[in-house]
Image (spheres, rainbow, N blue to C red):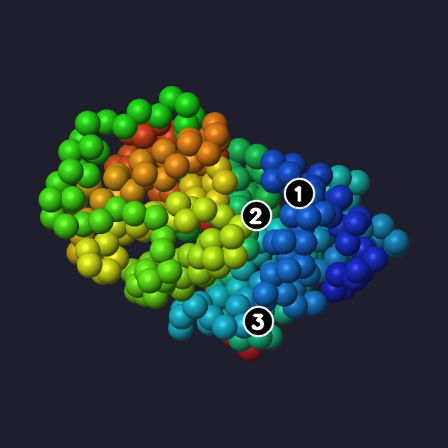
């Protein structure tokens, strides 16, 4: 069928949210979650939120984004698809294909030459397409000549079964001997944390930690939401949690191999446990990091994603 494809209107939001929740059931999309991830996206633009209609019925929806202020030169060439869904009544009628084509055209007109699904931090529902949950989406993007870039995993751990191994205690003792301080966030460490996040891991990490520090300073979260390792104010590693969500966690390239990552990880997991949380989870890791860091702490895989990429012709 040939649907009418047009930018999202406010009166269509309830129907679009309901349709998307049914099309992406594992994401548990509520009106509030739709607003957070799409309507309140700082890079929201009308032609990025496209609705396909069959008469007066919402048949499909796609959201594509591009940053107004790119994180770096490479990001200035990228666009992202973070959500796509088709109503069950209109499956296998080419609507998903037409929505993707419309999103590609909008991004090409803006000079984007690369389209990714969907590592658009921090405003993604998931970092890619769930391999087990959405096989139809895997098939759709593959048919549209997207290539598979990677297959990150999401992991979770039962905090009530958390036990800190002796090697972590030994590493903490050695770090103390080496004058490395492990402590929660405090205001004097604000700029060192931001500089560390930006220089070691990129602007998307800087955004996460800036937002977390603002929440702490507004009294909305405990200072222990962030833990860091530093020597005389020079940050060597940071970790973070937001409720049950763990991470991101990272250690300076020059400071790895000393157990800082493991010490920080257990510091945060113990903080989450003391807060009465039962589970810690995160959405994105590669298998190598999972084997090196997370599995030993009781994390196990519960989702696996495909990150897709497609080159776009510039206009």
Mark closer to the chain start, 2 or 1: 1
Q: Separation of disc 2 and disc 1 at Cα?
A: 9 Å
- Residue extending farthest to the top is 161
Does the CB distance between marks 2 and 1 fall below 8 Å? Answer: yes
Please state the horizontal and vertical placement of residue 201, each as a whole percent of the image.
Answer: 33, 58
Q: Separation of disc 1 and disc 3 at Cα?
A: 29 Å
* Image: 25 above or below 179: above
What residue do we see at 75% from left, 44% from top?
19
Q: Quadrant of residue 20?
A: top right
For mark 1, what is the residue? 29
For mark 3, what is the residue? 108
Quick one: 175 or 18, which is closer to the camera? 175
What residue do we see at 64% from left, 57% from top?
38
For mark 2, what is the residue? 125
| Label 1 SS | loop
Please state the horizontal and vertical placement of residue 105, each as a whole percent of the image.
Answer: 62, 68
Does the CB distance between marks 1 and 3 fall below 8 Å? Answer: no
Q: Residues within 10 Å of mark 1 (few under 14, many from 20)?
A: many
Mark closer to the chain start, 1 or 3: 1
Quick one: 276 or 46, which is closer to the camera? 276
Residue 96 appears in the figure: no
Quick one: 93 or 192, which is closer to the camera? 192
Quick one: 150 or 14, which is closer to the camera? 14
Q: Residues within 10 Å of mark 3 (few under 14, many from 20)?
A: many
Q: Residues within 10 Å of mark 2 (few under 14, many from 20)?
A: many
| Label 3 SS | helix
Would you say 210 lies left or right of 104 here? left
- The mark lying in front, picked from 1 and 3, is 1
């Amino acid at each position: 069928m040939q649907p009418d494809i047009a930018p999202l209107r406010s009166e269509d939001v309830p129907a679009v949210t309901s349709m998307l929740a049914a099309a992406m059931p594992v994401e548990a999309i509520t009106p509030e979650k739709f607003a957070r991830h799409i309507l309140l996206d700082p890079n929201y633009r009308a032609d990025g939120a496209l609705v396909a209609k069959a008469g007066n019925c919402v048949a499909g929806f796609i959201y594509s984004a591009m940053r107004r202020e790119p994180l770096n030169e490479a990001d200035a060439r990228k666009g992202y698809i973070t959500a796509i869904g088709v109503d069950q009544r209109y499956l296998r009628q080419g609507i998903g294909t037409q929505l993707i084509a419309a999103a590609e055209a909008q991004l090409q007109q803006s000079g984007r030459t690369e389209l990714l699904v969907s590592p658009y931090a921090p405003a993604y529902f998931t970092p890619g397409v769930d391999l087990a949950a959405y096989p139809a989406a895997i098939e759709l993007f593959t048919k549209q000549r997207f290539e598979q870039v990677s297959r990150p995993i999401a992991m979770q751990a039962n905090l009530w079964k958390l036990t800190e191994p002796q090697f972590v205690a030994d590493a903490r003792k050695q770090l103390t001997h080496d004058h490395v301080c492990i402590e929660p966030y405090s205001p004097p460490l604000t700029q060192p944390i931001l500089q560390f996040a930006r220089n070691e891991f990129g602007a998307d990490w800087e955004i996460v930690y800036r937002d977390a520090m603002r929440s702490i300073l507004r009294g909305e979260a405990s200072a222990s939401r962030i833990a860091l390792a530093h020597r005389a104010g020079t940050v060597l590693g940071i970790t973070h949690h937001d409720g049950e969500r763990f991470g991101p966690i990272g250690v300076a390239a020059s400071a790895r191999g000393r157990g800082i990552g493991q010490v920080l990880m257990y510091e945060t997991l113990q903080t989450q446990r003391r807060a009465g949380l039962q589970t810690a989870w995160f959405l994105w890791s590669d298998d190598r990091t999972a084997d090196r860091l997370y599995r030993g702490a009781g994390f196990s895989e519960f989702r696996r994603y495909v990150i897709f990429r497609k080159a776009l012709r510039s206009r």
